[in-house]
Image: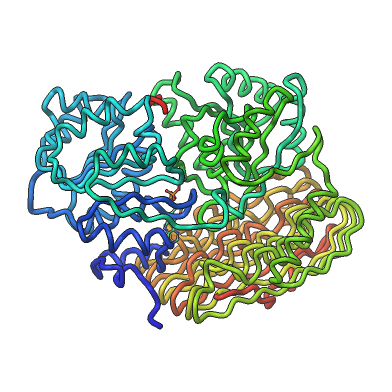
Amino acid sequence: MKKKNFATLGLSDQLNDALIGQGYSEPTPIQSEAIPTILTGIDVIGQAQTGTGKTLAFVLPLLEMIDPGKPHVQALIVTPTRELAIQIAEEVNRWAPLKGIRSLSAYGGQDVERQIRKLEGAIHIIIATPGRLLDHIRRETVQLHKLSTLVLDEADQMLHMGFLPEVEQIISVTPSRRQTLLFSATMPQRIRDLAKAYMRQPVEIEVKAKRVTLDEIEQVVVQTTDRGKLDALCHLINEEKPYLAMIFCRTKLRATKLNQELAERGYSTDELHGDLSQAKREQVMKRFRDAKIQLLVATDIAARGLDVEGITHVFNYDIPHDAESYIHRIGRTGRAGQTGKAFTFAAPRDAMYLEQIERGIKMTLGKQGGRRNEAVAGARGLEAGRASRGGRGAGTGEREARGGARGAAALAGRGRGGDAGASGRADAGDWSGQREVRGGARGAAALAGRGRGGDAGGRGRSGAGDWGGQREPRGGARGAAPQAGRGGDANARGRAGTGDWSGQREARGGARGAAAQAGRGRGGDAGGRGRSGAGDWSGEREPRGGSRGAAPQAGRGRGGDAGGRGRSGAGDWGGEREARGGARGAAAQAGRGGDAGARGRSGAGRGTAAQGGRGNRGTQGRGGTGGRRRER
Ligand SMILES: Nc1ncnc2c1ncn2[C@@H]1O[C@H](COP(=O)(O)OP(=O)(O)OP(=O)(O)O)[C@@H](O)[C@H]1O
């Protein structure tokens, strides 16, 4: 069977080639279903889980349908927040110039005059928040009477009370024969019914999943008290050591206060909410995206749509008041096939909300006392392993070997990737950790075999993670594989060198930089090479972030885009204790890309150290896989 790519969905070779070049060799399920339907010109309500590629599902057909020869606004994308408008505008701008399409983003807090000046040339597509768009409509600086397609992203929120009047005003100045597209991860029935009043016989595309939330996100409720919350949060942060984390609060005031408290305790943190100036909002988002801050304390303003690579954890410091908010908040992690963890703090008086959330997501969440219940988590991992029959997980851990073999099996062999015709295979992660070797072989398999990497016909290979950690070598071989095999686009190779390390103390992040983005490639764009040398270092205490600098952007380009290579050297380092995160970089995104006919390969992380060779039998181990609010 011919492998699906974007051209088989009806997109031009030009866009298809560019997508492949950027590591998007295979459409996600929502893209496969929505793109051809949208191209026929009919109305669509599209629903799929968070982080599954809905943005490109509507952006790509829009770009295909716009005629750059016609000097008027043909497509409009409306989003609930400025951050989302900026993010989508960036996505549009990645591809629009290829087709000679000009776009404009219009959102509050930005200089109107500047926007108006930009509007003087022909603009084909506008990405906007409702308030600012209405401002332009009133000033008659934007005319929508020839609009062909209107997209409401996060449609359920846009049609909720807070936005509905503005959306109706916008709709009233567009042609009635326009195409209307609605997308969201959540679409309550009452909103669907309401939406139909603004649509013409819409086709409803819903990518069915077993659950509404992603399996890739481990969800835990932390039972606490209002007074105990801050300590419980800090305890979890210290224990979990997120790479990037989002912490959600109910109000702007509470977000500011929590941010201050965390800063006083020495955390790398900042806040995001609607009381900040636009310049500050943009600066915070940039610093967070660049991993210059580890924690982002936010209100629900940041709950929807934001796609920031590297968010490993979401903390609901204040419990969300409905299931939709919960789904979107936790959906900031576990995106595009990665794994993540979501902790929700619940005080006794939050019981009602918790019930509501559990009803909404149709599952009962695991509960913990103030401290994580190690045994429960450990057992869960093993259970998952058994159930999925992925690889094998030999765990001989003794205490708190939490998560243990989980990766080794949980998702092994499973993948999104590794689709039809491909073999999905992941070796197990052997480990014999003794204390808190948490995360263990996780990387070794967690996603290995999963897929995106090493898609049908391609190879996704990742070393296994053999290691015998002794004290808190957490994260261990994780990098060695998590996304390994992911990349390596058509005809390209996504390769990441290994992460050699012999960490000693808190050498956290380890070789991570060396590869974090390695092979990933924004860097080595079409025809080019993204290469970065290794990051040698031998930090001893808290050399956190490791060789990160050495490579962060290395090979970034989704792996070495079409025809190019994304390569990153290894990160050698020798820390001593808590060499956490270990070889992670060595592969974290390594190989991202590696699709059709390509190879995504990631070297292993040789662990020579005190903490055990976390690294992997790796080089060869095959993981593989075959393959309601207003804008604030
Ligand atoms: N075909 C693809 N192959 C690989 N990665 C993809 C593909 N399509 C999208 N992605 C990536 O997946 C990530 C999530 O996509 P996107 O932000 O569109 O998710 P979403 O479904 O809109 O999520 P949310 O519901 O949270 O808004 C992005 O980083 C995007 O670049």
Instruction: Please name whichever residue, 290 or 400, is drawn nearer the observer in this view of the structure.
Output: 400
Q: State the image coordinates of residue 65 (x, y, percent, origin top left).
A: 18, 57
Q: State the image coordinates of residue 589 (x, y, percent, origin top left).
A: 56, 60
Residue 261 position (above or below residue 433): above
Instruction: Please name whichever residue, 104 or 209, is drawn nearer the observer in this view of the structure.
Output: 209
The quarter holding residue 152 reads: top left
Q: Relative to 539, is 251 on the left or the right?
A: left
Q: How is the image coloured?
A: rainbow
**Residue depicted at 66% across the width and 56% down the height:** 511
- Residue 605 visible to the viewer: no
Residue 437 position (above or below residue 304): below
Q: Quadrant of the N terminus?
A: bottom left
Q: Relative to 309, is 602 on the left or the right?
A: right
**Residue depicted at 63% across the width and 54% down the height:** 512
Q: Quadrant of the C terminus?
A: top left
Q: Relative to 510, is 273 on the left or the right?
A: left
Q: Relative to 64, is 370 on the left or the right?
A: right
Residue 131 position (above or below residue 420): above
Q: Residue furthest right?
A: 398
Q: State the image coordinates of residue 183 (x, y, percent, origin top left).
A: 36, 46
- Residue 515 visible to the viewer: yes
**Residue depicted at 77% across the width and 60% down the height:** 383
Report how many numbered discs are placed on residues in the image.
Answer: 0
Q: State the image coordinates of residue 50 (x, y, percent, origin top left).
A: 49, 48
Instruction: Please name whichever residue, 440 or 573, is drawn nearer the observer in this view of the structure.
Output: 440
**Residue depicted at 46% across the width and 41% down the height:** 306
The quarter holding residue 366 reads: top right
